[in-house]
């Protein structure tokens, strides 16, 4: 199975300068263009993007990594670019992906998964381990007759390798979705403030924060930690979200707040830099070990059937949405009441459907529904589909990949 990972090598050591005035000292590069950035130097193993008029690191990152918020990774991989605001037509920007090829223990699945670890880091290659598919006989000397040598048979044509699918979820989809946990988490430490605590209560990208524990909790320099916030405030968003408060049924809900890297650690405290923030980090947010989440691959386009018959597979319901919205569409995160117990896996697709009932019939049609209730009970409409990004014991975190109309809290789902 092949996996693409956006990887890391060292902590971020520089912060983005302000745009400022254009650099005054320009030099002519070997290819003839004028620039303030010296040649990229060694380019082996990198994809090379030649800057065109109108390019920015933001849109270059979107083109290659499919998530513009990862532009600090691209800047870190190009030390010749002193100021990311000033790149010039003709400059060569290096983009590096790494491919890890692992010998499959079983027949390869039809689709591969794509892992997206933390951003704001430079890229590095990883060694590849390739399964040897040759038999011993194929690698030992073989006697060839004179007739066979004189009339060699053409070698069979090799099948073209199947291109790796692109990830269906962006980094922000994966790491800012939130999740349910069957057990209450035991954090390593809590956020107690930051470098700017004299006049700052909230923290975000590149800010320095302080944690309530250090080496006695196993925290050490270089550790990457995930910052989360337990949320019990379902009721403020309306009674329709009250079922989500059922700890025995769903577990504990945590908001993804961001990720930090530890710079220093003492016995009872640690200092860390925010490397990514989904929302502003505040005091009492919790630090837990960082996890890598897998982005499902984007599957091939299939015809969407608005009136597909039941699949007969595992079925459940959308019981909550991110940010407590009652209606969502493409690209939104929803939570489904199916998890490990129902053998749901990352990459599974749910079909989202809705029955016809008195709850969703307008007042103008309710009498018709009552007269033909038995007939309405046999029909339904499919309103969208969602892919599973994370699975917990009793729930799944899903990304809506298609919606034919508004997807509503309480809609039914079934595995495709």
Image (spheres, helix red, strand yellow):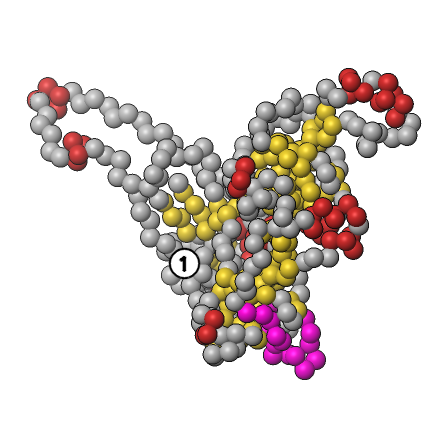
Residue 370 colored magenta?
no
Residue with the most extreme front position: 248
Residue with the most extreme bottom position: 198
Q: Provide residue 125's location: percent of width, then percent of height.
A: 38, 55
Residue receiving disc 1: 124
In-front residue for pair 289/276: 289
Helix, strand or loop for disc 1: loop
In the rendered structure, which segment of residues is drawn in magenta?
A: 189-209
Q: Is residue 325 left or right of residue 314?
A: right
Q: Is residue 175 left or right of residue 143?
A: right
Instruction: Please report the residue visible at 21 percent of the width from the left and 33 percent of the height from the top.
Output: 135
Residue 283 seen in the figure? yes
Q: Is residue 236 left or right of residue 395?
A: right
- Where 245 sits versus 190, above or below? above
Q: Provide residue 298's location: percent of width, then percent of height.
A: 54, 38
- Where 256 sits versus 102, above or below? below
Instruction: Please report the residue visible at 39 percent of the width from the left and 40 percent of the height from the top.
Output: 1
């Amino acid at each position: 199975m092949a996996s693409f990972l956006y990887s890391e090598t060292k902590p971020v050591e520089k912060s983005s300068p302000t745009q400022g005035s254009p650099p005054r000292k320009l030099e002519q590069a070997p290819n003839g263009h004028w620039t303030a950035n010296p040649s990229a130097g060694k380019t082996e193993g990198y994809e090379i993007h030649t800057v065109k008029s109108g390019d920015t690191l933001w849109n270059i990152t979107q083109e290659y990594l499919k998530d513009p918020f990862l532009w600090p990774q691209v800047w870190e991989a190009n030390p010749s670019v002193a100021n990311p605001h000033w790149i010039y037509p003709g400059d060569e920007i290096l983009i590096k992906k790494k491919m890890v090829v692992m010998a499959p223990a079983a027949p390869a699945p039809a689709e591969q998964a794509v892992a997206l670890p933390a951003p704001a880091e430079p890229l590095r290659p990883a060694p590849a381990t390739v399964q040897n598919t040759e038999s011993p006989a194929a690698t030992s000397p073989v006697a060839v007759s004179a007739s066979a040598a004189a009339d060699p048979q053409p070698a069979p044509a090799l099948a073209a390798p199947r291109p790796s699918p692109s990830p269906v979820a962006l980094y922000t989809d994966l790491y800012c979705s939130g999740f349910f946990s069957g057990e209450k988490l035991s954090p390593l430490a809590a956020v107690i403030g930051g470098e700017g605590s004299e006049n700052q209560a909230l923290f975000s990208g590149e800010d320095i924060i302080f944690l309530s524990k250090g080496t006695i909790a196993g925290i050490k320099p270089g550790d990457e930690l995930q910052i989360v916030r337990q949320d019990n405030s379902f009721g403020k968003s309306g009674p329709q979200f009250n079922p989500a408060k059922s700890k025995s049924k769903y577990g504990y809900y945590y908001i993804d707040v961001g990720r930090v890297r530890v710079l220093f650690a003492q016995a009872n405290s640690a200092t860390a830099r925010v490397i990514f923030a989904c929302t502003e980090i505040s005091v009492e947010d919790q630090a837990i070990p960082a996890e890598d989440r897998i982005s499902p691959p984007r599957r091939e386009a299939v015809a969407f059937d608005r009136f597909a018959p039941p699949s007969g597979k595992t079925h459940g319901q959308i019981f909550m949405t991110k940010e407590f919205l009652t209606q969502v569409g493409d690209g939104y995160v929803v939570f489904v009441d199916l998890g490990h117990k129902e053998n749901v896996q990352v990459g599974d697709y749910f079909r989202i459907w809705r029955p016809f009932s008195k709850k969703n019939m307008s007042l103008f049609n309710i009498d018709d529904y009552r007269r033909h209730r038995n007939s309405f009970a046999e029909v339904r409409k499919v309103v969208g589909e969602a892919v599973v990004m994370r699975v917990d014991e009793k729930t799944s975190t899903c990304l809506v990949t298609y919606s034919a109309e508004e997807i509503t809290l309480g809609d039914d789902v079934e595995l495709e």
